[in-house]
Image (cartoon, grey):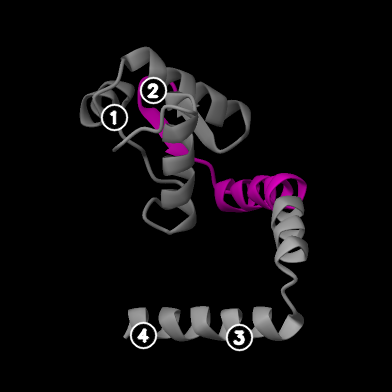
């Protein structure tokens, strides 16, 4: 994984895990790699991974089963979606709307863009 210098590594690992959960690459109830395993795989300090896991556990995304490991909580996808929706509406959408306003994009422009994205997604799935 290539890390971005402008964001804490433990947050980037959390984002990566959250995306894997949302993409169904890690299922609710599934055990995730141990702190040591993920630290070796990502070439980071174990404390960094432990901080990620602890943060995710505090948010209800992971469950720590002592002596067994960390598991994805049953409600994890819903929790992640709700958190990401809130972040999108509070941080990203206002910037996007400002950009639309500055560029004087019309509803027609946006409809064409959505159609283009849908067509690209459809082609990628085939």
The answer to which image quadrant residue 61 occupies is top right
C-alpha gap between disc 4 and disc 1: 34 Å
The answer to which image quadrant residue 34 occupies is top left
Local secondary structure at mark 4: helix
From the viewer's side, name the closer residue of 55 and 4. 4
Are circles 2 and 1 on residues that touch, CB within 8 Å?
yes
Local secondary structure at mark 2: helix
First in residue order: circle 2 vs circle 3 = 2
Say above or below: 8 vs 100: above
Say above or below: 74 vs 54: below
Question: Residue 49 at what x, y percent from top left?
Answer: 39, 22
Question: Horizontal placement of 4 versus 85: left or right?
Answer: left
Identify the magenta region. 65-92
C-alpha gap between disc 4 and disc 3: 17 Å
Looking at the image, which residue is at 73% across and 48% down? 86
Question: Residue 25 at what x, y percent from top left?
Answer: 36, 55
Looking at the image, which residue is at 42% across and 31% down? 70
Most prominent secondary structure in the magenta stretch?
helix
First in residue order: circle 4 vs circle 1 = 1
From the viewer's side, name the closer residue of 104 and 12. 104
Q: Residues within 10 Å of mark 2 (few under 14, many from 20)?
A: many
Which residue corresponds to mark 3? Answer: 112
Which residue corresponds to mark 1? Answer: 38
Mark 1 vs mark 3: give the one in front: 3
Which residue corresponds to mark 2? Answer: 49
Q: Is residue 44 visible?
A: yes
Which residue corresponds to mark 4? Answer: 123
């Amino acid at each position: 994984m290539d890390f971005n210098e402008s964001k804490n590594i433990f947050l980037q690992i959390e984002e990566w895990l959250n995306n894997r959960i949302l993409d169904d690459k890690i299922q609710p109830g599934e055990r995730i790699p141990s702190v040591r395993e993920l630290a070796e795989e990502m070439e980071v300090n174990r404390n960094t991974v432990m901080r990620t896991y602890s943060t995710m556990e505090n948010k209800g995304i992971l469950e720590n089963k002592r002596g067994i490991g960390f598991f994805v909580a049953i409600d994890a996808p819903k929790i992640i979606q709700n958190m990401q929706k809130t972040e999108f509406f509070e941080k990203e959408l206002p910037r996007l709307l400002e950009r639309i306003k500055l560029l004087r994009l019309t509803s027609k422009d946006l409809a064409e863009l959505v159609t283009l994205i849908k067509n690209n997604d459809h082609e990628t799935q085939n």
